[in-house]
Image (cartoon, rainbow, N blue to C red):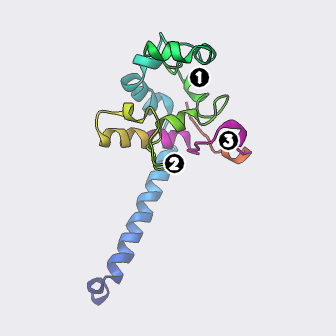
């Protein structure tokens, strides 16, 4: 009882609870899939600009300014389209755009972070689902990525 009163026991209890919560998060991360979790976020938050009327990646690159003026980004309305922005050919693009800024030197969020939800809480909740889905949340571009970086990207269907 004296240890709890002194703070030692409480600190140990809090550390233990934190470790347990981390294990639960990691265990649940393996269950995050495109079809169950990510697609609903894409459908709710992204398809107005990245849906059926959006250009393919190559077409967007050719006329980024023109498509952007029309409120369109590259197509990301299917698993096949979206997975390429996490792994290859446009490695890390998804992560760079959705990141909340906590992984950058300047602290600035990615240009699509604010579209992840209507409130900070919703954005953070959706971001955590994306991070768990991707696995290795790397802001690196393909030339900077190691084999280990790429192997850590899971993006389960």
Residue 62 in the figure: left or right of residue 51: right
Residue at the spot 48% in from the left edge and 17% down from the top edge: 68
The quadrant of the rendering that contains the C terminus is top right
- What are the residue bounds of the magenta stretch? 129-146
Residue most toward the top? 53
Residue 32 in the figure: left or right of residue 87: left
Q: Secondary structure at mark 1?
A: helix
Query: Looking at the picture, how far across and down is residue 41, in whole percent?
Result: 40, 29
Q: Earlier in the sequence, mark 3 or mark 2?
A: 2
Q: CA distance from mark 2 to mark 1?
A: 27 Å
Q: Earlier in the sequence, mark 2 or mark 1?
A: 1
Are circles 3 and 2 on residues that touch, CB within 8 Å? Answer: no
Say whether residue 61 is magenta.
no
Q: Earlier in the sequence, mark 1 or mark 3?
A: 1
Residue at the spot 59% in from the left edge and 34% down from the top edge: 86
Q: Nearer the viewer, residue 108 or 19?
A: 108
Question: Callout 2: few (<14), some (14-19), or many (20+) C-alpha neighbours within 10 Å?
Answer: few
Q: Is 21 rendered above or below residue 123?
A: below
Q: Which residue is mark 3?
A: 150
Q: State the image quarter where residue 49 is shown.
A: top left
Question: Callout 3: few (<14), some (14-19), or many (20+) C-alpha neighbours within 10 Å?
Answer: some
Residue at the spot 67% in from the left edge and 45% down from the top edge: 149
Residue at the spot 65% in from the left edge and 38% down from the top edge: 141
Q: State the image quarter where residue 151 is shown.
A: top right
Q: Which label number is shown at residue 104?
A: 2
Q: CA distance from mark 1 to mark 3?
A: 17 Å
Q: Is 86 rendered above or below residue 42?
A: below
Q: Which residue is mark 1?
A: 80
Q: CA distance from mark 3 to mark 2?
A: 19 Å
Are circles 2 and 1 on residues that touch, CB within 8 Å? Answer: no
Query: Looking at the picture, how far across and down is residue 52, in whole percent?
Result: 48, 11
Marks 2 and 1: which is nearer the front?
2
């Amino acid at each position: 009882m004296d240890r709890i009163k002194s703070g030692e026991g409480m600190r140990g209890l809090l550390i233990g609870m934190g470790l347990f919560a981390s294990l639960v998060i990691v265990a649940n991360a393996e269950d995050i899939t495109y079809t169950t979790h990510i697609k609903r976020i894409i459908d709710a938050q992204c398809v107005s600009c990245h849906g059926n009327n959006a250009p393919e990646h190559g077409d967007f690159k050719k006329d980024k300014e023109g498509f952007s003026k029309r409120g369109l980004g590259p197509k990301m309305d299917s698993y096949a389209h979206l997975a390429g922005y996490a792994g290859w050919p446009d490695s890390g693009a998804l992560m760079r755009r959705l990141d909340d800024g906590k992984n950058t030197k300047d602290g600035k969020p990615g240009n699509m972070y604010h579209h992840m939800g209507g409130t900070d809480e919703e954005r953070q909740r959706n971001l955590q689902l994306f991070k768990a889905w991707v696995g290795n949340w790397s802001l690196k571009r393909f030339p900077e990525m190691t084999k280990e970086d790429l192997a850590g990207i899971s993006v389960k269907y």
